[in-house]
Image (spheres, rainbow, N blue to C red):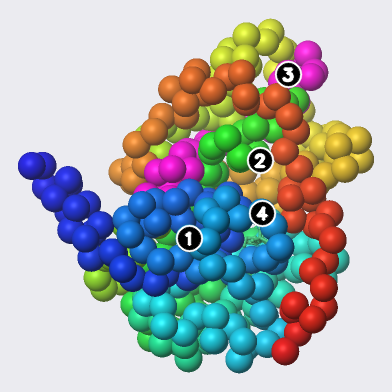
Amino acid sequence: MCPHTSQRQTQIESARDETIVITGAFSYTGKYAAGILLDRGCRIRTLTNRPERENPFGDRVVTFPYYFDCPERLTEALRGASTLINTYWVRFPRGSSTFEAAVQNTCTLIAAAKKGGIKRIVHVSIANPWLESPLGYYKGKARLEQVVMESGLAYTILRPTVIFGLEDILINNIAWFVRHFPVFGIPGDGRYRIRPIYVEDMARLIADAVAQEGNAVLDAVGPETFTFEELVNLIAGQLRRRIRSVRVPAAAAYLATRVAGWFVHDVVLTWEEYQGLMAGLLAPQGSSTGETRLSTWLAANREHLGARYASEVARHYALTPPPSFFRKC
Ligand SMILES: NC(=O)c1ccc[n+]([C@@H]2O[C@H](COP(=O)([O-])OP(=O)(O)OC[C@H]3O[C@@H](n4cnc5c(N)ncnc54)[C@H](OP(=O)(O)O)[C@@H]3O)[C@@H](O)[C@H]2O)c1
């Protein structure tokens, strides 16, 4: 047996019968990680903003609201579990849902985990977080890494770049624009790089980290790196679309996505996301931790990719808020 297979087997064995709390088990990355852990015999609880949402795992996953306003109830939701997997974050600030609020909520969650007897935290961060970053996303994520490391819990911190898959937003929406418009505006010189990881590879890293010992910080990156322009052309090629990619100043590209956002009722890409992308923050160096090649995956999924626009706002903001009795102490 190859050493990787036996290591994976040991991880699967030791995870069996454990109770794991995972945030967002009905959302994107969390859903794939929950699926793997259920297959490995774990008991799963999830925390979510929408406990009333259809549960794809049936009674195999027990659901709790986030209870950020009520740390005692949050602690009870975590009590008896061995590991907390935290995927919770906000992609951009909107209304009261700010990066600062997300940092505060995550601190509440980590404190509740400690109080509830959690031993290990698997925390999903971002590639290239930085405490001094002018970008709120990267700064907030760096602050939370610090909180996780100082929590006293054993931890694995995973730092993904863009996570691609059927429910992904960024790559899907590039494909949507490619399908609908003959011209694609490439912000700046288009030479900044991006190194996406497949959602199932990301989920496997999360699931494997549950059974790891000690502390680790790991970039979650795929085997292929593209410049942004190459990525757009690759997508267009897979969709058999002849587009003209035109280099435009970043501010003009941003303005165009703002206008497009009015039509699709979404925030297509924030100015911060443009800055992070163009600064090359989505392409850390080092060996790959994901196996799936985006180019291969695109070829196999070309008819689904970009067939529908994927809206962050519809996914996380255009929701009927849960009844207040659900959320308060
Ligand atoms: N997706 C990517 O390409 C990517 C790239 C780099 C890093 N990451 C990081 O990976 C983690 C998982 O990302 P994901 O895309 O898989 O996230 P997700 O599943 O869409 O959301 C993860 C959790 O955060 C909650 N959440 C998301 N947006 C929210 C909002 N605006 N207000 C309140 N709660 C919100 C979700 O709530 P519900 O349970 O109610 O849905 C869910 O519990 C995040 O920490 C993210 O920063 C993702």
Distance from disc 2 to disc 3, alpha carbons, whole Å, reads 15 Å
Q: Amino acid at mark 4?
A: Glu
In the image, what residue occupies the spot 54% across and 37% down?
A: 165
Secondary structure at badge 3 equals helix
Q: Amino acid at mark 1?
A: Arg
Residue at mark 4? 54
For residue 184: magenta?
Answer: yes
Residue at mark 1? 60
Question: Which badge, 1 or 2, is on the more N-terminal residue?
Answer: 1
In the image, what residue occupies the spot 23% across and 65% down?
A: 14
**In the rendered image, which quarter is residue 288 located in?**
top left
Distance from disc 4 to disc 3, alpha carbons, whole Å, reads 31 Å
Q: Is residue 60 above or below residue 105?
A: above
Label 2 beta carbon within 8 A of ligand 1: yes
Distance from disc 1 to disc 2, alpha carbons, whole Å, reads 27 Å
User: Mark 1: few, some, or many residues within 10 Å (few <14, many ≥20)?
Assistant: some
Secondary structure at badge 1 equals helix
